[in-house]
Amino acid sequence: MTWLNKENGFEHINTLSKARTPFLFITSFDNQKIFAQPLEHLDNDIFYKLEDWRNYPVKKRTKDFTFSKFPVDFNTYKKALAEVLEEIRSGNTYLLNLTFRTPIESSFTLKEIFTYARAKFKLYFKDEFICFSPERFVELKNNTIATYPMKGTIDAHLPNAKETILADKKEMAEHVMIVDLMRNDLGIIGSDIKVEKFRYVEKIKAGEKELLQVSSKITAKLPSDWKDNAGTLLSQILPAGSISGTPKKSTLNIINHVENFDREFYTGIFGVFDGESLRSGVMIRFIEKEKGKLFYKSGGGITIDSDAKSEYEELIDKIYLPLD
């Protein structure tokens, strides 16, 4: 299929939203590939879930599955991390989301993994890629925009896990930087910016593990005519700060240099406009198919206080299938 480029893609989103046409949209991490299609004519091999919005029936898993992962070796990860830390020491970034591509194997197909995965935000696209994301991006409703940056992860079964993650100075610094970045991003398109909830903890299923994830909620008021230019508004705040870093422009340049793969749709966003409101999710917990093989993309935020071993373990912990 032919993807729309950045200019044409966001303009097409504007056209659909101005007409109050319900549609689904997808953007790549670099916004150079954009998909937007009315829900009424949505291709029959695209399925989505955004909390209680979905276009497919719920099915219960009735058979076992296998899952194996083959992550990058620690020394390779440590070398990339060292490059990022040097950029931080040079003042070129303060927080960077470092990610890797991991070969995986499963007895389940992409469609089966999507169908049975438990997550608030899910997307299946034409047997090419899926995501089962715990992270909202933005919600636009009643002339208000809300974003929910997610930064900070810990094994839920560790002793005093919640207290530990909330007291961790590195995680606190990382989260504060992302909240500040998202406040600034919302300030580009809105007014009366508020941090309504700061560092609240949610539990998510991560394969055989359970993880605690730390999020915040930030809101701003939008112009009353926001539905006439939803694409333009989105373009001004992408890519999502939680999966890029700060300052955004220089950090994106470092990501392109340090990471050894093209993110493509991983860490992009997808969403649905229902004619009145818009919901979207960040495409993390992401699997793509290439020449019949499956690859999982994952990573985490790096700051000056990052420890190579714990960051490497977090990257691996995020490679999972959240199946019952």
Image (cartoon, rainbow, N blue to C red):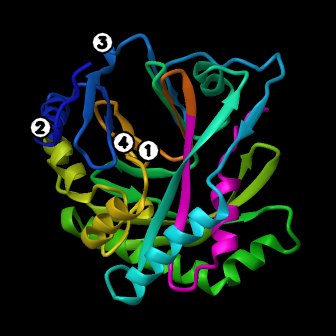
Q: Percent from the top left, x then y, of residue 106?
A: 71, 27
Residue type indicated by callout 4: Glu
- The residue wearing badge 4 is 264
Residue 312 colored in magenta in the image:
yes
| Residue 156 sits in quarter | bottom right
Nearest the viewer among 146 and 271 is 271
Q: Is residue 67 left or right of residue 132?
A: right
Dot in front, 2 or 4:
4
In the image, residue 202 above or below residue 126? below
In the image, residue 222 above or below residue 245? above
Count numbered badges in the picture: 4
Cβ–Cβ below 8 Å for labels 4 and 1?
yes
Part of the protein shown in magenta: 295-324
Residue type indicated by callout 1: Tyr
**Residue at 83% in and 17% down:** 63
Secondary element at tag 4: loop
- The residue wearing badge 3 is 41
| Spatial CA span between label 3 and label 2 | 19 Å
Mark 1 closeness class: few <14, some 14–19, many ≥20 residues within 10 Å: many
Q: Earlier in the sequence, mark 2 or mark 4?
A: 2
**Image quadrant where one finds the N terminus:** top left
- The residue wearing badge 1 is 266
Secondary element at tag 2: helix
- The residue wearing badge 2 is 11
